[in-house]
Amino acid sequence: MIDDTRVTASDVFVAMLARDLRVARREIGFTLVRTLMQPTLLMIVFGYLLPKMQMLPRAYVTTLLPGVLAVSLALSAVQSVALPMVASFGATREIEDRLLAPLATHLVALELVVVGVIQGIVAGLIVLPLGRVIMGTVPGLTLSSLGLTLGMMILSASAFSTLGLWLGCAVNVNQIGLMFSFIVAPMLFFGCTYYPWDGLHVVPWLQKAVLLNPLVYVSEGMRGVLTPGVPHMDPAVVAFALTGVTVIAWWFGLRAFYKRAVG
Amino acid sequence: MIETIALRKAYAAPLTRRRAGSGDATRSGPVLALDGLDIAIQPGEFFGLLGPNGAGKTTTIGILTTRVRATSGQAFVAGVDVASHGELVRRRIGVVPQRPNPDRGLSVLENLLFHGAYFCLPRAFTAQRSGQLLEQLGISDKADAKVDELSGGQQQRLMIARALLHEPQVIFLDEPTVGLDPQARLSLWEILRTLHRDGRTIVMTTHYMEEADQLCGRLAIVDQGRLLACDTPAALKARAPGETLIDLQLDRPADGASDACRAVPGVSRVDVSDHDVRAYCMRGGEALPGLIKAVEAHGHTVRNINLAKPSLETLFIALTGRRLD
């Protein structure tokens, strides 16, 4: 007979975290390729080739790095939560073991979000040095701005990890392809990743419309801390928006999670 | 140990597909999976929930294992209310799912080690007990294998090992032998008998009559969310009507033939539906020629004949009007 009283929520939470990190560590090679492929190609074409061909001004490079970082971080956070969750609630039912563990259901969801945040930050930390190597000195990439950069990364990863929770619960296996075509692709191209938000004033209605896109705040936030010389949103506004996205996505995500987890 | 009081569960209509052939295809509004279920299970019992697909068995297990919220009514497991104290219930139960759901990112042994961690068991205890369980269940040679390398039966054993690891007071098994080959099924039966001998409370759902008969000390027959009968297999069999049940399938709708069949000596009851005549006969096979003559006298031809001795199955048919399959 097991002693009931020894079970504490924090221990169960840590055990689940340990499991997820072990599996993530095993897949580190795959994660590296997945995380690095797109930014590497982007940076080679837009950061190196096109400026060398003089088809893009050299200054464009500095606009690009924050966006590339934002995409890597956001996609990594959202995918590492949403994709396993879709499979886990669908075909494999792997999540049952956690749902049957002595842990409150909202903490099971929170653990998955925390894993997403960690994966997002790791992706960001992988891409940053790559940007430095390919694109040369980055103004904001100094030791003194590291704290600010990390803070912005945590906020961004939290927003997209909770969005992953929501998406992962709301989307079925057969809708994943659709999700990428209809949600992720527009989000990437209208996420101020390849141009600063300020520049969008040339199409005023679009400049307002993209404010609904959470990736805009990640890109602008990164721009603010990494390339302060390029026009960017006020970091305080960005922090407020990302916190708002996190709260809203957590609220809806948790509701969706309960709906899937408890029949 | 386990008690349900007037347990009801209604699902929103579009989400649940009604069992084919149960009629009422146009029924709108919520679908009742459980319609006032009362069950009481004592400690140490091997209790079976028997019923066709869609009877409400899995919903019952779902509620008792805190995975499904009841619409109304109450359920207690190991003295704890499942609705208000889910975490406490989960500490005390082990669940073997209908379809194995091992953690595919981990090896067989790791599945058990992390499960132990989820239940805050001491590491050394988990390691020792995991080895012991894998040995007992005959998959110790697979300890370091990936889960995908296991056969269906081996995965099912891993699920049993996982459910037992934290020494639960009650073990729930939902259709544990579906999809297993006959040999794996028999071996699982042996494992379950051993667990029961060790004094564990076991609750199992099945739609196999033989399985229920062989394993369970007490059986609840459920259909359409209601409890139809609850007793030992022997007592239930004794309640089966008549001695033998004869099904005749005719070439065309059987109406008109029922009175003639009822007049055959030894026949105690006749049910007619569409092409089928179902007769409950006191003298078993002796009534068969008389029944065939009776329907042929009405111009029917017999296409198929099926005999069933008094069993859980004949009781089930008498209670519900249909076969289990």
Image: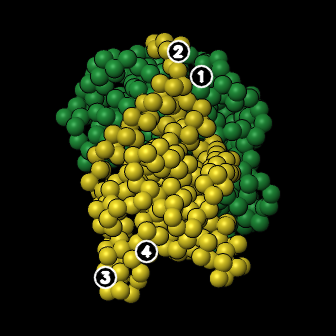
Chain colours: A yellow, B green
Q: Which residue is mark 1?
A: B88
Residue B272's mark?
none
Asked whether the residues under the numbered discs 3 and 4 touch, taking CB atoms below 8 Å apart as contact, a structural biologist would say no
Q: Is residue A198 visible?
A: yes
Quarter of the image for residue A261 reads: top right
For the residues carrying marks 1 and 3, which lies nearer the camera in this image? 3
Residue A4's mark?
2
Q: Is residue A149 left or right of residue A257?
A: left
| Residue A228: percent from left, percent from top | 51, 60
Q: Is residue B228 visible?
A: no
Q: Which residue is mark 3?
A: A52
Q: Secondary structure at mark 4?
A: loop
For the residues carrying marks 1 and 4, which lies nearer the camera in this image? 4
Residue A59's mark?
4
Q: Secondary structure at mark 1?
A: helix
Is disc 2 in the same subunit as disc 3?
yes
Q: Is residue A33 left or right of residue A163?
A: left
Tell me which amino acid carries mark 1.
Answer: Leu
Tell me which amino acid carries mark 2.
Answer: Asp
Sequence-first tag of 2 and 4: 2
Asked whether the residues under the numbered discs 2 and 3 touch, taking CB atoms below 8 Å apart as contact, a structural biologist would say no
**Mark pair 2, 3: CA separation:** 67 Å
